Amino acid sequence: MGSVSGSKSIPIDGVQNRQVDLARIGESFWSVYHRWEITGSDIFERSIVSELSRRLPHIDPSSWPARFDLGGVYLAGQQALVSHVISPPCRLEYYEPKVPLEHVRYQYAEFSPHSILYADEDLSIVIKPARLPTTPSRDQSRYNLQRYLTEHFGRAVHLPSRLDSAVHGIVLCSLSSRMNRYCQKGFEKRWFEKYYIAEVEGAAPKESLLVEFPIARDPLHPVLRKCVEQGGEKAETRITLIPSCIPASGKRHLIQAEPLTGRTHQIRLHCQALGIPIVGDPYYGGAESDELRLVSYALRFHHPYRREMVTFKLPKTCWPEWLAAAVGGDGDDINLSYRSDRQQTARTHRD
């Protein structure tokens, strides 16, 4: 059974009780998903392009090379090439962009080198814009942060922690093999402290809560996850109200969310489970908005080669409008409750 520390344990069914709006979820996607299970022997050795042209006659056949180059075509679960042939039985999948092919690039935010907050030989801290995937996505592989950073630094870039495409904010990038190893161990040991700010709607908790609802895939839709009682992965998020920041609506609040584990959609699900869905979240019952009001605001960790604790925050010049409006014109920063500070205070009191 999932629980919220500092409160009584709450059955999952009692806190989730959500309505899934599949139509709204579908509208939020930038592509239409097609899937075919091909079993007949009559198309043995037919080219993948001719098969796609036969099944999707509304698409200009001459555009298929460009569509394969963009990505989003899969054969037997693997990304397909324009030269592949169909050999049944197999599964054929295609993520068709909703806009004309020449307009796809305008859907994705551009990345600028000015978004790099810090870089040394081992790591970099960058600001990922909303509407840009962190890594290649299922529906396209051209527009993503990892590709832009690889081109910028001229070497392999490892992203040990990823943001949802709709999330804006700070991302850690590893630039060396030794940092890759440190990050892998560090995230397992919780050496890295990640802090998010979200605008939520509902009765926000007055005290800091540790939410511990396990997370599993939701059979209602492949992209969705849900909180479960059994069979899910362990998930922990500390959620703290930021009382000094008040959005325009009296029903809305700003919260600090610190994920202690890294499950898909974890913060979004745990906010929904508490009855305070994030504004603009089409997956998990958030109020309507033109953007997901969730930002990766700060990152704190011990730099293994500078041998000091470092903290990186999202500069105010990079705040989304909704966050700036909630904090107010006089606020240049948001006071966070850092885990390492709390632990140090506890040690001091014990001593």
Image (cartoon, grey):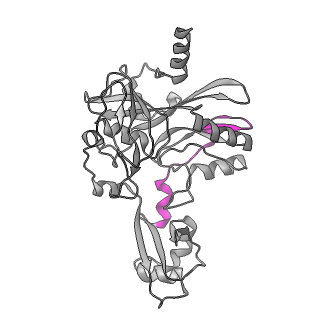
Q: Position of residue 132 (x, y in %)?
A: 51, 49
Please tell me which residue is depicted at 40% across the width and 55% down the height of the picture: 223
Please tell me which residue is depicted at 31% across the width and 26% down the height of the picture: 7
Q: Nearer the viewer, residue 60 or 265?
A: 265
**253 drawn magenta:** no
Q: Which of 332 and 223 is in front in this view?
A: 223
Residue 98 is at least partly visible in this image: no
**110 drawn magenta:** yes
In the rendered structure, which segment of residues is drawn in magenta? 101-125
Please tell me which residue is depicted at 31% across the width and 42% down the height of the picture: 286
Q: In which quarter of the image is the N terminus?
A: top left
Q: Nearer the viewer, residue 303 or 25?
A: 303
Q: Position of residue 317 (x, y in %)?
A: 51, 30
Residue 8 is at least partly visible in this image: yes
Q: Where is residue 85 in the image (x, y as percent from the top left)?
A: 56, 82
Relative to residue 172, is residue 58 depicted above or below?
below
In the picture provided, is 133 more to the left or to the right than 309? left
Relative to residue 186, is residue 217 depicted above or below?
below
In the picture provided, is 15 more to the left or to the right than 54? left
| Residue that sits furthest to the bottom in the current view | 42
Displayed quadrant of residue 249: top left
Q: Where is residue 77 in the image (x, y as percent from the top left)?
A: 52, 68
Q: Nearer the viewer, residue 45 or 105?
A: 45
The image shows a total of numbered marks equal to: 0
Q: In which quarter of the image is the C terminus?
A: top right
Displayed quadrant of residue 80: bottom right
Relative to residue 226, is residue 249 depicted above or below?
above
